[in-house]
Image: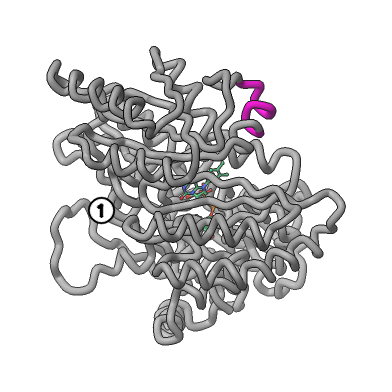
């Protein structure tokens, strides 16, 4: 282990680190500093001092005790797919990567639970549970890289929230290491436990600022029956919402209701070399997934509903996947958007949500505001609209420098965020606050709430060594 590149870390800390852990525990390789010092955002320069790779909760605990003793700041790191710079180490922090902690214990098919280490990859949990006909229904495009620890720390949402809710609904027990090194076991495998405050919920969604999650007992559910995946072309945003209302009033089980604008479709087609399902153009598209009806009667009802969509002019065109492969291709058109937009340009991302009942009024205000404020910019609209969540991505014009672009977006934020507040929404539906959205927080949280955040932080991490500067300063 070479510790000479350890930035401004205290010599005594480095010496104890070297003495207390095996050589492979630490890396100061430039490529590791670059890789593990950042997440999916490309706004901040990664500048960690060193990267630690604990293989057990005990190692995380001993490391945090040491960091506490020397007041060394740390950044917990999962799959680094985060979109708010929560896992970015830009100020010489020690990064704690959980990637050597990926163990999956056997599934308990009766309790429908599984205990995993926090570095387990989300999709690996899906495969593991599927062998018992079960699933952990936290699902989105980055599931092949994101980790359970990261999902818990961001209370991740995704494409199935409309049916299953957020990550927090699917966590029974948590193992968390506090800044002091103390290990907490919260909840175990209990479904019911009304013995005072539910401390798990403090850590879920806390973006690594209150503790490092090292393990979790996950609640599983039955794998849904084979899905029916539809892709519709619609005339305008109002039709997206009409289709949503029409779907919600039916008796079939809706797994997902996602929408995207034409320029998103074009970007994915270009980036992934995919064909459009339609010959004509339309301004918006909806991907709708339902669980295949079990009975003949259910199937007949679904077909009648589909026919009515065309008769009533709710949709312009539509297609139904005829095989799992075709379903996957349709999903690629939606799930490939973030990757396709970021592949060739810098994008500024909004992750807004409003109560479902306010969607219509909010989207109409938002679309007209964006048209005015972002004149001359390319704006991409897509998202999990079925749960009230819209993603707005703004592409940086090539002529603008990164700094000028970010300054412009900040100015426009000052117009967009009040709209979110007017409609009682959130400035970050599922990506978190991290470094990127700190300036937005006050639009969704009151000064009283922020004061409580600080009290909780002070109680659990009095020296402020856990992910400092994330969520608030
Ligand atoms: C293409 C793409 C699509 C995406 N789609 C969605 C989506 O639909 N819905 C959604 O919610 N998100 C989405 N995301 C964002 C991201 O995948 C999620 O936020 C995910 O939960 C992050 O997991 P991670 O392991 O990559 O965490 P990281 O990015 O490594 O970390 C995220 C935050 O969690 C903290 N953290 C990580 N591990 C731990 C731990 N063990 N203990 C304590 N804190 C920890 C970090 O410090 C950081 O603050 C998408 C990202 C991409 C790139």
Work out whether residue 262 or residue 27 is closer to the camera in this orientation and state it: 262
Name the image quarter holding residue 96: bottom right
Which contiguous range is marked in magenta?
267-274
Rendered-image quadrant of the C terminus: bottom right
Q: Position of residue 134 (x, y in %)?
A: 26, 31
Q: Residue furthest top?
A: 322
Q: Secondary structure at mark 1?
A: strand
Residue at x 44% of width, y 35% of height: 286
Identified at 28% across, 27% down, the residue is 308
Q: Pointer 1: what residue?
A: 172
Residue at left offset 39%, top offset 53%: 388
Q: Is residue 114 visible?
A: no
Q: Measured along the vertical axis of the image, is residue 110 above or below residue 304?
A: below
Find out if the beta carbon at label 1 lies less than 8 Å from the nearest ligand 1 atom.
no
Q: Residue at x 32, y 58 (%)?
A: 357
Callout count: 1
Q: Is residue 163 above or below residue 436?
A: above
Q: Does 66 sit above or below residue 454?
A: above
Point out residue 444 in the picture as x, y percentages from the top left corner.
46, 73
Neighbours of disc 1 within 10 Å: few (<14), some (14-19), many (20+):
many
Q: Nearer the viewer, residue 168 or 466?
A: 168
Residue 353 belongs to the span the image colors magenta = no
Q: Nearer the viewer, residue 63 or 39?
A: 39
Out of 280 and 249, give the one closest to the viewer. Answer: 280
- In the rendered view, would you say 15 is above or below 324? below
């Amino acid at each position: 282990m070479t510790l000479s590149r350890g930035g401004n870390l205290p010599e005594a800390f480095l010496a104890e680190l070297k003495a207390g852990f095996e050589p492979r525990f630490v890396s100061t390789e430039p490529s590791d500093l670059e890789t593990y010092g950042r997440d999916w955002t490309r706004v901040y320069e990664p500048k960690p001092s060193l990267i630690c790779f604990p293989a057990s909760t005990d190692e995380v605990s001993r490391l945090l005790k040491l960091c506490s003793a020397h007041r060394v700041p740390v950044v917990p790191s999962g799959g680094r797919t985060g979109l708010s710079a929560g896992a970015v180490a830009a100020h010489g922090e020690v990064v704690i990567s959980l990637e050597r902690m990926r163990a999956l214990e056997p599934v308990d098919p009766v309790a429908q639970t599984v205990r995993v280490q926090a570095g387990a990859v989300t999709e690996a949990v899906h495969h593991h549970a599927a062998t018992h006909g079960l699933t952990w229904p936290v699902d989105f495009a980055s599931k092949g890289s994101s980790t359970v620890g990261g999902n818990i720390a961001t209370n991740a949402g995704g494409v199935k929230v409309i049916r299953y809710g957020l990550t927090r609904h699917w966590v029974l027990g948590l193992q968390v290491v506090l800044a002091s090194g103390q290990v907490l076991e919260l909840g175990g495998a209990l479904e019911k436990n009304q013995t005072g405050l539910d401390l798990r919920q403090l850590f879920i969604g806390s973006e690594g600022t209150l503790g490092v999650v090292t393990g979790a007992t996950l609640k599983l559910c039955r794998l849904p029956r084979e899905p029916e995946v539809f892709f519709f072309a619609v005339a305008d945003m109002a039709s997206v919402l009409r289709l949503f209302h029409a779907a919600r009033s039916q008796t079939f089980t809706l797994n997902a209701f996602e929408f995207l604008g034409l320029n998103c479709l074009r970007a994915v087609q270009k980036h992934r070399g995919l064909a459009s399902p339609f010959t004509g153009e339309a301004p918006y598209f909806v991907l709708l997934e339902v669980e295949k009806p079990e009975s003949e009667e259910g199937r007949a009802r679904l077909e009648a509903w589909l026919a009515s969509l065309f008769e009533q002019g709710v949709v312009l065109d539509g297609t139904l996947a005829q095989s799992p492969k075709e379903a996957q291709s349709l999903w690629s058109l939606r799930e490939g958007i973030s990757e396709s937009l970021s592949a060739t340009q810098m994008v500024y991302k909004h992750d807004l949500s409003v109560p479902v009942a306010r969607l219509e009024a909010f989207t109409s205000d938002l679309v007209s505001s964006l048209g005015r404020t972002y004149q001359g910019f390319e704006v991409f609209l897509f998202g999990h609209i079925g749960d009230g969540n819209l993603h707005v991505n703004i592409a940086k014009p090539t002529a603008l420098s990164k700094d000028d672009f970010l300054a412009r977006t900040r100015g426009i934020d000052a117009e967009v965020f009040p709209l979110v507040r007017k409609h009682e929404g959130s400035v970050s539906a599922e990506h978190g606050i991290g470094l990127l959205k700190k300036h937005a927080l006050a639009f969704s949280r009151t000064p009283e709430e922020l004061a409580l955040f600080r009290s909780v932080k002070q109680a659990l991490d009095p020296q402020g060594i856990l992910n400092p500067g994330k969520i608030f300063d």
